[in-house]
Image: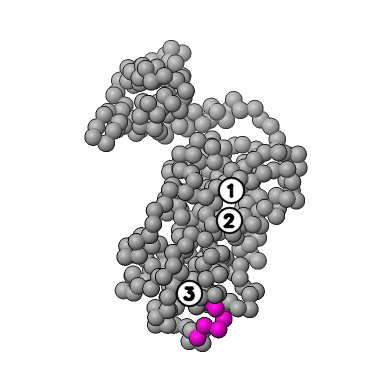
């Protein structure tokens, strides 16, 4: 096959079709008509001598050949986009850029508070638009509509770039006058009432069912391993709320240590080591391959990484 005879726009069509899994959605994404996209799919089938997408009960399903092509096409287009993008230096002192960051409450309360302090000094005209996990999807990040996602991820799409910002242990927060402070053990832990804080991911969330222990996250998963279950009375998505409730209501909040340490200087708060093992968690930043070589994005990633190291060593 002579590559000179291939319409390279077809590769863009294929990339979007495989990502969206729908002719209609792909057409909307590229701002072309559905018949034009259908014609593009027909030409792609002729080009690769394969149906590529087959209609099944689950919708348009990619063939084996299509799945093989997907990462290759994405890589080719990403490199092409990077090549034709004009190379410009990023000057943080002069930039008026807006960075959109999806961040969990945990990341926002601990990491980003310090990042904003650095930005105010080093990039005074840069704006941060902080978005909650329920406001965006992986697709928004993949397309570069959101610059970065900072959270604790169980898994990420293979196309994403990612970096661990830090690893964090867990701590228990209680009121300093709570009697359990004097003899804090597993029995006392289980006899008291607890606050659960969400391990928020992407997409719109739903309410919590306290009986579905397997869905409650790290703390409850570890208790289940030793045949125990805590009595959760409050479910919240906000760490400051959990900390305030632990301080005011004699409830126990078991949460990442960097969040707990926000109250380390409060005389009414006692921070205790959990009476059972909980593996550390990783806070990660993840971003689209489309932004990997963007000068401003590189600068922001470096700054966040530096802040993460400083907070870990402090």
Q: Can you say whether 111 is above or below 299 in the image?
A: below
**Residue 108: mark:** 2
Answer with the quarter of the image where residue 93 lies.
top right
Report the residue at 52% width, 73% height from top: 246
* Quadrant of the snapshot with the C terminus: bottom right
| Residue 25 screen position, x and y as percent | 40, 29
Q: Which residue is mark 3?
A: 252
| Residue 49 screen position, x and y as percent | 30, 20
Q: Are marks 2 and 3 in contact (CB under 8 Å)?
A: no
Answer with the quarter of the image where residue 41 lies.
top left
Q: Give the camera-side residue of 5 and 126.
A: 126
Left or right: where does residue 309 sit relative to residue 169? right
* Quadrant of the snapshot with the N terminus: top left
Report the residue at 42% width, 75% height from top: 193
Determine the CA span between mark 2 and mark 3: 22 Å
Answer with the quarter of the image where residue 5 lies.
top left
Q: Are marks 2 and 1 in contact (CB under 8 Å)?
A: yes
Q: Helix, strand or loop at disc 2?
A: helix
Determine the CA span between mark 2 and mark 1: 8 Å
Q: Can you say whether 21 is above or below 192 in the image?
A: above
Left or right: where does residue 83 sit relative to residue 188? right
Q: Give the camera-side residue of 27 and 280.
A: 27
Q: Can you say whether 132 is above or below 39 in the image?
A: below
Determine the CA span between mark 3 and mark 1: 29 Å
| Residue 177 lies in the magenta stretch | yes
Q: Helix, strand or loop at disc 3?
A: strand
**Residue 130: mark:** 1
- Looking at the rendering, the stretch of residues picked out in magenta corresponds to 174-179
């Amino acid at each position: 096959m002579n590559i000179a005879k291939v319409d390279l726009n077809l590769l863009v069509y294929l990339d979007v079709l495989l990502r969206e899994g729908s002719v209609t959605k792909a057409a909307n994404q590229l701002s072309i008509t559905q018949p034009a996209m259908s014609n593009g799919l027909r030409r792609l089938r002729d080009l690769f001598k394969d149906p590529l997408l087959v209609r099944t009960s689950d919708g348009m399903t990619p063939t084996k050949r299509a799945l093989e092509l997907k990462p290759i096409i994405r890589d080719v287009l990403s490199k092409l986009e990077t090549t034709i993008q004009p190379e410009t230096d990023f000057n943080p002192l002069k930039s008026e850029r807006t960075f959109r960051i999806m961040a969990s409450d945990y990341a926002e309360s601990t990491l980003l508070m310090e990042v904003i302090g650095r930005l105010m000094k080093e990039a005074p005209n840069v704006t941060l638009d902080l978005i909650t996990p329920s406001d965006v999807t992986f697709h928004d990040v993949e397309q570069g509509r959101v610059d970065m996602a900072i959270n604790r991820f169980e898994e990420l799409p293979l196309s994403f770039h990612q970096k661990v910002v830090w690893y964090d242990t867990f701590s228990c927060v209680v009121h300093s006058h709570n009697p359990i402070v004097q003899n804090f053990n597993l029995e006392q832990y289980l006899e008291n009432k607890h606050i659960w804080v969400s391990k928020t991911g992407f997409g719109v969330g739903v309410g919590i069912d306290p009986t579905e222990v397997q869905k409650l996250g790290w703390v409850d998963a570890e208790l289940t391993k030793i045949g125990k279950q805590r009595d959760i009375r409050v479910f919240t998505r906000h760490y400051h709320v959990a900390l305030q409730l632990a301080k005011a209501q004699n409830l126990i909040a078991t949460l990442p240590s960097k969040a707990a340490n926000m109250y380390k200087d409060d005389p009414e708060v006692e921070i205790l080591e959990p009476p059972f093992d909980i593996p550390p968690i990783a806070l990660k930043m993840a971003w689209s391959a489309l932004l990997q070589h963007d000068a401003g994005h590189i600068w922001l990633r470096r700054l966040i990484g530096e802040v993460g190291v400083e907070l870990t060593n402090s």
